[in-house]
Amino acid sequence: MPTSTAPGKVYLFGEHAVVYGEPAIPCAVERRATVSVEERADDRVVVEAADLTLDGFTVTFDGSTADADPELDVPTRLVQSATGYVEEAVAQARAAAEAPEAGFELTIESEIPLGAGLGSSAAVAVAAIDAATRALGVTLSREEIAEYAYQTERAVQDGGASRADTFCSAMGGAVRVEGSETQRLDTPPLPFVVGFDGGAGDTGKLVAGVSALQERHGFAADTVQAIGDVVRSGERLLADASPEAEPSPDLLKGLGELMDFDHGLLSALGVSARSLDAMVWAARDAGAHGAKLTGAGGGGCIVALDPTGETARALRYAPDCVDAFRAELATEGVVRT
Ligand code: MEV
């Protein structure tokens, strides 16, 4: 049975602004979604989600309606959101393999919390598309998987999606995305620490909120452009650094300052949350070089830069934090097992 895994990600810089054509630098991290797929004799799709770091659930898609297990004890909004991505990933896999009637049994396991800014939906979409197309005898390139996974997010997020999460998950490593231009970056191993508040944000709604804000206020559009400027400054710092060597204190200081700035701009766009701000301050107080929310925001995760153990330790004691861990760069994107 084809099984594929794909990593989650943190944003060094540039979430939200990337939806409007500014550059972004997401980095894949070693927390993975694993999807196994078996073809069915009929055209139904049965999804078993053993662990999406919330309690498991089973859903069956028949046409376009997902019926969730009535015993379900995860928030309905999150399950609907997760199943929306899986359903669309299946549609993309059917299209890629030119098998519109294909039915599947999918088993999903994930170490990435749902909707928390670590790219759970992109990782599930990437792994599901790769495993489902292989179950139909078609092997896609990583670039093709990234494109079909992007189409998945675009459909589910009502057009408000960039290629950043899906390209990063498919390719692995640090990547740069600006509109349809995508490339892998050689960066030194950055000492990411993640803090998780146990919550989640609704990506579609948060993206729509930023869009509405820009329609109401010109300065919100300027804020989005300012995030692009932060990313360009960060790129210059990374371009001067040797990818082989440990990052210098000056590089970490420079990147950290830009992360702090980025968080301020994202807050101005209304996508932070009290718990995210509290974790960002706990990280800074612990001596992190910089800290910001990661992903769509609204709740979920922050990312900080700290080569020492101090930030993770402080976050573990912070009242708003339920989990803190070091996030290693995942140099491999989608992996076939
Ligand atoms: C979500 O992880 C990142 C956003 O920029 C949306 C996207 O790029 O698709 C908020």
Image (spheres, grey):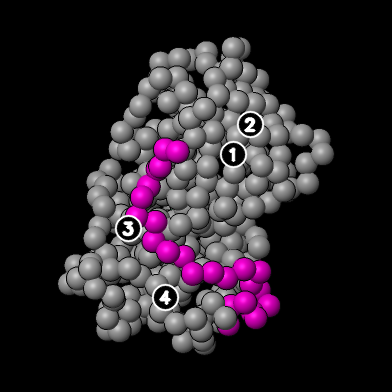
Identify the residue at horizontal 64%, vertical 72% (top origin): 321
Can residue 240 be seen in this snapshot? yes
Q: Residues within 10 Å of mark 2 (few under 14, many from 20)?
A: many
In the picture, measured across the screen, residue 279 lies left or right of residue 143, that is: right
Q: Which residue is mark 4?
A: 305
Label pair 2/3, CB-CB below 8 angstroms: no
The quarter holding residue 260 reads: bottom left
* Residue 224 belongs to magenta span: no
Task: Identify the secondary structure beneath mark 1.
Answer: strand
Q: Which residues are magenta?
A: 314-337
Task: Identify the secondary structure beneath mark 2.
Answer: strand
Q: Which residue is mark 1?
A: 108
Label pair 1/4, CB-CB below 8 angstroms: no
In the picture, measured across the screen, residue 201 lies left or right of residue 160, that is: right
In the picture, measured across the screen, residue 175 lies left or right of residue 29, that is: left
Relative image position of residue 291 (x, y in whole percent)? 45, 75
